[in-house]
């Protein structure tokens, strides 16, 4: 090991670039000396210019007992016997590049296989041999806390190195850091700028991110038309998230003429790749007959695929289908099972669904009240309305009646546009009973 002359970071003996600061490291030229007189051997001369004796660069002795001696004395490269000595330096550099790429591919494979310690090891080796792409892998490890302690600041630094060298994935990830304020102050305009750089190179993930920025006006002026254009680019490359987003645009007429059958077509493409959002959206299309013939059983099939992958919205939909027998036999036990799955993730519609189930199916008002309170405190308008109603009438010793609390939650719900809450609040303000 040796130290980088710029940042003093420790690097490998053969490193061409510092993995800490990215600066190029000049290789030391090893000096050789004549074994007979001690004079320095210049230009790999086969004979010493001082005493005339053969040097280590003289032709190999055919009677040498070690058949690899002539190779070992060159550069410890077992393939050197196939090289022209005049081409030695360029070929050596090419091999370093090939080795760096090999380590990068191993790092990426290890990362995808969740073998994060190996991913870091291979990535660092790749960086030392000059691969700027490997900075991105190291950044991902720090960003997600994979194989190392989570450190957004370090992740940002490594993504920046990859991005500055023009690596599209690094540019996209740097944009994400600015987007979320991870390791750097949040800056949506800067996020957009880096997404743009990566998208212009054809990187599908960045194209989808750029489309999202245009769709919701993040760091750029809102434009549904531009959103669709970028989603289309990524979708045409087969990127599932973009295909789902494009389907959404066609379903709701965002930046394009509303076309439900086209929405279904794109949802289907993404759903077939296992995208949980598309699977759930496709299920809803089948359930309500949007852009496709109504088919409740097909809806349940797609909801279940997404629910089994842990998507809370799909889990709630499965609970609803099981509770009311939509596309599947009515099964209250299964309904509760799926509702609870979504509730455990904090999904407020599922909290309300489970509360409603306890209230109306089991008559378990205490459990229902606790769930409505949880939903209300999470800011859900429906939960706030239901919790207001329970506070108004009370429930024995478990929940004493309180008009003040009821009106407080009614106002919270009405402020979000909940129609029943607005009507109840209007009655109250006119001196009538709100419920």
Image (cartoon, rainbow, N blue to C red):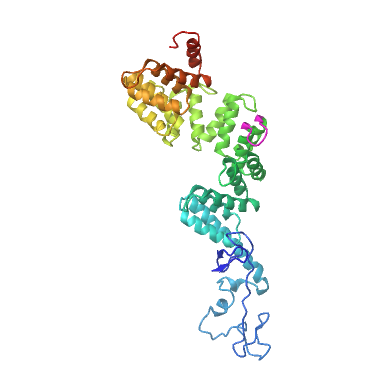
Asked whether, in this view, residue 176 is left or right of residue 411, the answer is: right
Q: Quadrant of residue 321?
A: top left
Viewer-proximal residue among 315 and 265: 315
Task: Identify the residue shown where x is 60% and y is 29%.
Answer: 249
The correct choice, above or below, for 63 with respect to 283 in the image is: below
The correct choice, above or below, for 142 with respect to 373 in the image is: below
Task: Identify the residue shown where x is 65% and y is 74%.
Answer: 85
Asked whether, in this view, residue 155 is left or right of residue 387, the answer is: right
Viewer-proximal residue among 275 and 419: 419
Span colored in magenta: 215-224
Report the label total: 0
Task: Identify the residue shown where x is 47% and y is 57%.
Answer: 118
Where is residue 32 shown, x and y percent of the image? 61, 81
Q: Main secondary structure of the magenta part?
A: loop
Q: Is residue 328 visible?
A: no
Q: Quadrant of residue 22?
A: bottom right
Where is residue 203 shown, x and y percent of the image? 62, 44
């Amino acid at each position: 090991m040796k130290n980088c002359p710029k940042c003093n970071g420790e690097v490998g003996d053969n490193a061409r670039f510092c993995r800490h600061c990215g600066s190029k490291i000049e290789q030391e030229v090893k000096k050789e000396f004549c074994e007979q007189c001690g004079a320095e051997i210049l230009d790999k001369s086969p004979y010493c210019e001082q005493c005339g004796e053969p040097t280590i660069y003289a032709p190999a002795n055919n009677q040498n007992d070690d058949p690899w001696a002539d190779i070992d004395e060159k550069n410890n490269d077992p393939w050197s016997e196939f090289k022209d000595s005049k081409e030695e330096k360029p070929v050596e550099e090419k091999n370093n590049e090939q080795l760096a790429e090999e380590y990068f591919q191993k790092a990426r494979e290890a990362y995808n296989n969740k073998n994060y310690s190996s991913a870091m090891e291979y990535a660092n080796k790749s960086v030392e041999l000059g691969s700027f792409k490997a900075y991105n892998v190291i950044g991902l490890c720090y960003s997600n806390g994979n194989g190392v302690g989570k450190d957004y600041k370090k992740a940002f630094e490594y993504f920046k190195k990859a991005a500055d060298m023009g690596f599209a994935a690094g540019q996209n990830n740097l944009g994400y850091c600015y987007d979320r304020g991870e390791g750097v102050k949040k800056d949506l305009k800067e996020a957009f700028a880096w997404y743009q750089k990566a998208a212009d190179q054809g990187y599908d993930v960045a194209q989808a991110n750029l489309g999202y920025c245009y769709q919701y006006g993040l760091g750029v002026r809102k434009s549904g038309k531009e959103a669709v254009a970028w989603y289309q680019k990524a979708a045409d490359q087969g990127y599932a998230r973009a295909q789902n987003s494009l389907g959404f645009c066609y379903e709701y007429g965002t930046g394009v003429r509303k076309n439900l059958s086209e929405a279904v077509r794109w949802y289907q493409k993404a759903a077939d790749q296992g995208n949980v959002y598309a699977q759930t959206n496709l299920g809803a299309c089948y359930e309500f007959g949007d852009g496709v013939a109504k088919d409740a059983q097909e809806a349940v099939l797609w909801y279940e695929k997404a629910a089994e992958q842990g998507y809370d919205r799909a889990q709630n939909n499965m609970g609803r289908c099981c509770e009311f027998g939509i596309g599947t036999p009515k099964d209250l036990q299964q309904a509760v099972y799926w509702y609870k799955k979504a509730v455990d993730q904090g999904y407020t519609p599922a909290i309300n669904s489970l509360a409603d189930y306890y209230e109306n199916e089991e008559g378990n008002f205490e459990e229902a009240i606790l769930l409505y309170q949880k939903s209300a405190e999470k800011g859900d308008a429906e939960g706030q309305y239901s919790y207001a109603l329970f506070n108004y009438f009370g429930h024995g010793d478990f929940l004493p009646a309180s008009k003040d609390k009821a009106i407080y939650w009614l106002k919270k719900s009405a402020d979000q546009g909940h129609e029943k809450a607005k009507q109840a609040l209007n009655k109250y303000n006119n001196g009538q009973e709100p419920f």
